Image (cartoon, helix red, strand yellow):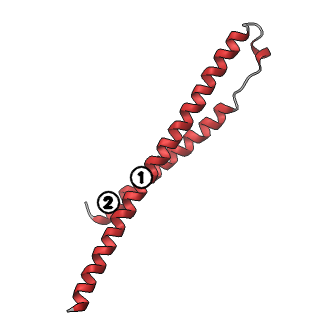
Amino acid sequence: MTFKTSMEALTNDAKRWDDTAAMLQTAGAKCADLTLRAQDFSFMGGDTHEAYEAVREFMRSYLLDGERAAAGAGNALIKVRNTYEGSDEAAKQRLKEAWEWH
């Protein structure tokens, strides 16, 4: 795999993680909007409403945790790419300086 191909792969993988984070953020926001009132469960009682809210809040939190993790993975891949890219540029500069010095 060439250096250019490796950089493209890191960029593409980071974008996939960023896209996943965006999807999870959207799902988490939609989950947050799925609140119901206690009277919506009047035929089943307040315990059902409490259970529903506990599950809804768990899912919202779970999705947002997933968003943060996916965004972190994307950011980490970009940092790796930038580090490699910076190392490559620094190596090129050192080589150029070595040739110019002689």
| Up/down of 96 relative to 4, above or below | below
- CA gap, disc 2 to disc 1? 15 Å
Q: Quadrant of residue 96?
A: bottom left
User: What residue is disc 2 on?
Assistant: 6
| Mark found first going from the N terminus, 2 or 1 | 2
User: Looking at the image, which residue is at 42% across and 52% down?
Assistant: 76
Q: Is residue 68 left or right of residue 39?
A: left
**Image quadrant in which the C terminus is located:** bottom left
Choose mark 2 or mark 1, whichever is in front.
1
Q: Secondary structure at mark 2?
A: helix
Q: Secondary structure at mark 1?
A: helix
User: What residue is disc 1 on?
Assistant: 76
Type of residue at label 1?
Ala
Q: Is residue 23 left or right of residue 99?
A: right
Provide residue 53's location: percent of width, then percent of height.
66, 21
Provide residue 45's location: percent of width, then percent of height.
73, 8
Q: Residue furthest right?
A: 39
Q: Is residue 79 left or right of residue 58?
A: left
User: Looking at the image, which residue is at 55% across and 34% down?
Assistant: 63
Type of residue at label 2?
Ser
| Up/down of 45 relative to 101, above or below | above
**Image quadrant in which the N terminus is located:** bottom left
Decide: few, some or many residues near mark 1? Use Cα within 10 Å; few <14, some 14-19, many ≥20: some
User: Looking at the image, which residue is at 58% across and 32% down?
Assistant: 61
| Up/down of 77 relative to 47, above or below | below
User: Looking at the image, which residue is at 36% across and 56% down?
Assistant: 9
Provide residue 44's location: percent of width, then percent of height.
72, 7
Number of numbered labels in the structure image = 2
Q: Is residue 100 left or right of residue 14?
A: left
Contact, CB < 8 Å: mark 2 with mark 1?
no
